[in-house]
Image (cartoon, helix red, strand yellow):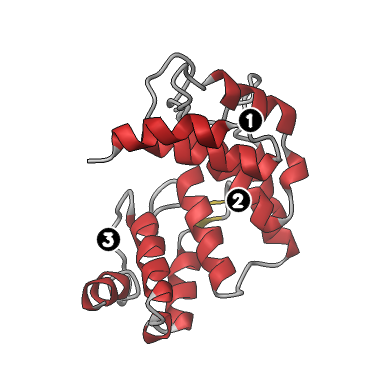
Amino acid sequence: MRHFLSCSAKPCASPPHPPHHSLSFAFRRCLTALDVLHAREQIPAEDVVAFVKACYVPEVGGYAPSPGNDAHLLATLSAVQILTMYEALPGAEESEAIGAFVAGLQQSDGSFFGDSWGEVDTRFSFCAMACLTLLGQLGRIRLDDAVKYILRCMNFDGGFGVGPDSESHAGQIYCCVSALAIAGRRPQNSFYVLIPLMLCCEC
């Protein structure tokens, strides 16, 4: 618990916050761990919310991983998750802007860019769908196309890769299965197909 408290307190320290490409992801994970340990209240809620709001990039409608960085889909999901935990989601206008940012990253084949630089990864499909679900805006994307793209990334072993024809990876399996569950499209018997693969991934 002391470790998570120490890690969670750092982003809430007095600004300026040091730019870091994964700060908000680590912050959300630490806060989740503290919540499981019934210790989340040891980090002042107003400090948490203030840090997340400082990561907002109004020019594009998304959140950066730390103040001063570019907005990214991964960071936007982390921000929305944290704000949901603290019942501090933004008002209608900002929520609409966030939804537009996320939906605008969907590509013609149903996949999602992580940001304006154009990287495609099945993690981003999950991030987009989870983020929009929390905002009540899942209808903003072409859900059927998103599902078809994810299913194109499914391999013969039942797992999923970062894209079509990519090797299966436990992290991608989590993201893809979760995304399909959000869409209500989880393949039949996929749980039983995945058990042997996940056992092989265990160290």
Q: Which of 104 and 195 is in front in this view?
A: 195
In the image, which is nearer the foreground, mark 2 or mark 1?
1
Q: Along the polypeptide, which appears first: circle 1 or circle 3?
A: 3
Please identify the quadrant where the N terminus is shown.
bottom left
Residue matched to label 2: 131
154 vs 136, left or right, is: left
Q: Do the residues labelled 1 and 3 touch (CB within 8 Å)?
A: no
Q: Nearer the viewer, mark 1 or mark 3?
A: 1
List x then y, in percent, for residue 202.
28, 40
Query: Which of the two discs, 3 and 2, sits closer to the camera?
Result: 2
Q: Residue at x 65, y 57 (%)?
A: 134
Residue 187 is tagged as 1
Q: Distance between the residues labelled 1 and 3?
A: 43 Å
Label 2 sits on a secondary structure element that is helix
- Residue 48 numbered mark, or none: none
Q: Residues within 10 Å of mark 3 (few under 14, many from 20)?
A: few
Q: Position of residue 159 (x, y in %)?
A: 45, 27
Which residue was labeled with disc 3?
Answer: 18
**In the image, what residue type sits under mark 3?**
Pro
Task: Assess disc 2: are there few (<14), some (14-19) or many (≥20) residues with their C-alpha within 10 Å of its C-alpha.
Answer: many
**How far apart, in angstroms, are the residues tagged by discs 2 and 1?**
22 Å
Q: In this view, does 7 lie above or below 161?
A: below
Q: Which of disc 1 and disc 2 is earlier in sequence?
A: 2
**Position of residue 132 measured from the top left corner of the image (x, y, whole percent):** 66, 49
- Tell me the amino acid under the disc marked 2: Cys
Residue drawn 43% across and 70% down?
51
The amino acid at mark 1 is: Pro
Q: In the rendered view of the protein, which quadrant contains the C terminus?
A: top left
Question: Would you say residue 142 is visible in this rendering?
Answer: no
Residue lying at the far top in this picture: please name it.
165
Label 3, label 2: how many angstroms apart (C-alpha)?
25 Å
